[in-house]
Amino acid sequence: KNEVEQSPQNLTAQEGEFITINCSYSVGISALHWLQQHPGGGIVSLFMLSSGKKKHGRLIATINIQEKHSSLHITASHPRDSAVYICAVRLGWEYGGATNKLIFGTGTLLAVQP
Amino acid sequence: DTEVTQTPKHLVMGMTNKKSLKCEQHMGHRAMYWYKQKAKKPPELMFVYSYEKLSINESVPSRFSPECPNSSLLNLHLHALQPEDSALYLCASSQGRVRGASDTQYFGPGTRLTVL
């Protein structure tokens, strides 16, 4: 079992729909990142969370530390949101010197159709 | 400037060639990373440099040789690669603060490597 699990693996939505991508993890973390990668492209960091909720434009990210779960929401989705969304966690201090390391989920491929 | 640049964007090399990938950042970050990403897979960490010293080597074959000549530059020297090494190679940097949560990694656009 992966330490970071994402669901769904693939998601197709119509333009304007509200989208939710989920991430569950099984390790102690100091932070959780949501990343976006367009096909063939580099990675853009969307959010870094250690608690609560963050909002940037149409994107909202939440995290529940007790339940070891995070969600990424996209409101009023648009075809330009089509990309792979990756959840990655930064290990907590209990893992000693490994805390620079990110553990990645397998990603969610989102396709938003016009 | 929140940009990590990588050169070249694309590289095709034979199994006997020697080539280098270059990564540069001018954000004053003291941690730099090399990742390898195969198609439809998440990135896999290869190396981490912290304050110009190699701090993590994820059991990467010796045909990949990292180098951090200064705090802004990170190179990955390639020699005698195999076709299965074809992938997107991503560089990232972060402030390098180990304690505390906020150490966001900024990623470069990657170098698409093809080994023939």
Image (cartoon, helix red, strand yellow):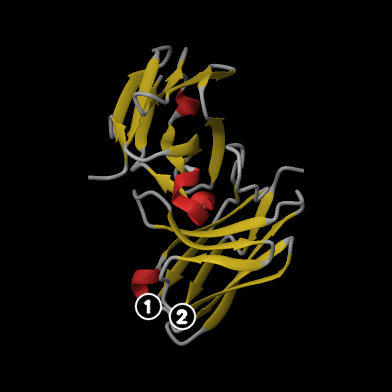
Quarter of the image for residue B32 reads bottom right
B102 up-or-down from B23: above or below: above
Residue found at x 57% / y 58%? B33
The chain letter under disc 2 is B
Q: In which quarter of the image is residue B10?
A: bottom right
Q: What x and y, as percent, mark residue A62?
A: 46, 20
Q: Which amino acid does label 1 sit on?
A: Gln
Tell me the residue that label 1 is attached to. B82
Query: What is the C-alpha distance between the residues marked 2 and 1?
Result: 9 Å
Check the image and report above or below for A50 versus B48: above
- Give percent across and percent down for residue A95: 44, 50
Discs 2 and 1 carry the same chain letter: yes
**Quadrant occupied by the N terminus of chain A:** top left
Label 2 SS: loop
Label 1, residues with CA under 10 Å away: few <14, some 14-19, many ≥20: some
| In the displayed structure image, the side of residue B16 where residue B74 appears, left or right | right
Are discs 2 and 1 less than 8 Å apart at CB? yes
Q: Which residue lies furthest to the left in this view?
A: A1
- Please provide percent x and percent y for residue B108: 60, 51
Of the image marks 2 and 1, the number of the one nearer the N terminus: 2
Nearest the viewer among B11 and B36 is B36
Residue drawn at (61%, 64%), measured in percent from left and top?
B8
**What is the quadrant of the C terminus of chain A in the image?**
top left
Residue corresponding to mark 2: B63
Q: Residue at horizontal 51%, vertical 47%?
A: A41
- Chain letter behind tag 1: B
Circle 1 SS class: loop
Residue lying furthest bottom in this view? B16
Q: Is residue B34 left or right of residue B53?
A: left
Q: Name the residue type under label 2.
A: Arg
